[in-house]
Amino acid sequence: MKRKYIIAVATILLLSSPLLYFNIRNNENFFIISVGSLLTLYITIFVSYFLVQKMTNGRKQKEIYIKLLSDMQKLVTDKSAYTISPTDDSARLTTIKRSMSNYIGLIDKYSKKFHLEDEIIYIKDKFSEYETLLSDHISDFTYLSKSSKELKRPLELITEKLSEMMLKMFD
């Protein structure tokens, strides 16, 4: 990246040097500039730089948030979240629940910035359904192994809402 930047700057300097030399040689007032023009130039450069920087930071934050949503979506659509065998252990299920809960917490923390408060409330509600079903039968793996459809339903609704949130980020 740094090398590409140096090459780009060197190319611009090489291409603009003949033009600069021609202007300096043929225009004796080339370096004469009023204070007002100089001040305008500095203000323009300063404002342009900070506006571009602010837009870049906002774009990066959006990209990171969308990555968070996508990672959460992968976690929720993972078959291990709703397909449970009768020989499973509660530690694995607790880990899955905790991971989902952590992602929801992160998504919730920044939802206000991206105006996604209603969506996160919906996701929390559906996650609560999933969590309740797991918690109520955490020691009955035979029941949970037969309940994959009931476990999958709130996760599918969360997946759809996450997709909707990703699309809404570009409105």
Image (tube, rainbow, N blue to C red):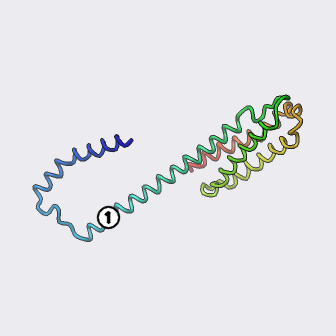
- Find residue 111 and report its horizontal and vertical position in percent: 64, 54
The quadrant of the rendering that contains the N terminus is top left
- In the displayed structure, 134 sits above or below 85; it is below
Residue 115: x and y in percent read: 62, 56
Which residue sits at x=31%, y=44%? 6
The residue most toward the bottom is 35
Q: Nearer the viewer, residue 166 or 20?
A: 20
Number of dots carrying numbers: 1
Q: Secondary structure at mark 1?
A: helix
- Residue name at image x 39 percent, y 62 percent: 47
Name the residue carrying label 1: 42
Residue drawn 80% across the image and 43% down it: 130
Taking the spot 54% from the left edge, 51% from the top edge, the residue there is: 61
Under mark 1, the amino acid is Tyr
Query: Is 11 displayed left or right of 26 in the figure?
Result: right
Give neighbour class at mark 1: few <14, some 14-19, many 20+ (Cα, 10 Å).
few
Residue 139 x/y as whole percent: 88, 37
